[in-house]
Image (tube, helix red, strand yellow):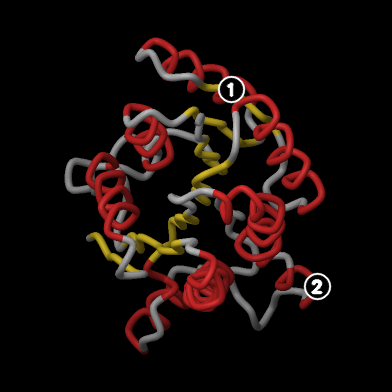
Amino acid sequence: MSKTIVVVGFGPGISSAVAEKFGAAGFSVALVARNQDRLASGVSALQARGITASAFPTDAGDPAAIREVIARARTQLGPVAVLHWNAFGGAEAGDLITTDPATAGRVFDVAIVGLLGAIQEALPDLRDSAEGAVLVTNGAFGDLSEQVDNYAVRMGSMGVALANAAKHKLVGLLAQRLKGDGIYVGEVMIAGTIKGTVWGNKHSIDPVAVADTFWELYQARGEMHARLS
């Protein structure tokens, strides 16, 4: 039976490497992002490797839109066996003291609300698959430590830290909630920048190493969390 990985938040770096890794293992690949040119380039690159891939432009922070995309990917490519959530909601609410509280609430649109919409729509497929999994990219600002909190404040990244911490907790909650359905939920937390992105440099983390870590978590289906730096 065909199986599909839906990669939400597609772009250079981690999501591209994950798409190639799972595509090479026999998955059809649904690429989801807002940038249509980037999606088209990603689909072409995957197809050049002999991987079945399609583009689905949408806003990952809109739960109705993301659910519709999951449904279309299922129809076009086959049952969703893996959901990879790599979407980044932006850097709003950098200073939680001066930010409008309504703006602060929007940091959860992509990190939590969109992710939940995608999972709920994909859930029947994930339950039916012997390999059902939700794989989440997260950032080390989500760590609960005084050092990380101090750094997030100094960097003006308090909103990002809040979203990452909530996403980290969500992974744990969903892992417990869905394990009885045979669905694996796990995350890779990135403590650094990624090569091939606008923030990357020669000391950055290789996205292939991140994709390999996701694959190892997915295959082992044991540990919920991994960290790369």
Provide residue 222's location: percent of width, then percent of height: 31, 68
Total labels drawn: 2
Q: What residue is at 77 percent from the left and 78 percent from the top?
A: 101
* Disc 2: CA contacts within 10 A as few (<14), some (14-19) or many (>=20): few
Indicate left or right for 182 with 124 as reference.
left
CA–CA distance in space, label 1 to label 2? 35 Å
What residue sits right under mark 2 in the picture?
102
Q: Which of marks 1 and 2 is nearer the N terminus?
A: 1
Mark drawn on residue 54: 1
Which of the pair 188/155 is nearer the observer?
Answer: 188
Provide residue 173's location: percent of width, then percent of height: 53, 78
**Relative to 20, is 135 above or below?**
below
Q: What residue is at 48 percent from the left and 71 percent from the top?
A: 179
Q: Say which of marks 1 and 2 sits in front.
A: 1
Q: Which residue lies furthest to the left in this view?
A: 203
Residue 166 visible somewhere in the drawing: no
Name which quarter of the figure residue 142 lies in: bottom left
- The quarter of the picture where the C terminus appears is bottom left
Provide residue 86's location: percent of width, then percent of height: 50, 49
Local secondary structure at mark 1 = strand
Three-letter amino acid code at disc 2? Ala
Name which quarter of the figure residue 207 lies in: top left
Provide residue 198's location: percent of width, then percent of height: 40, 39
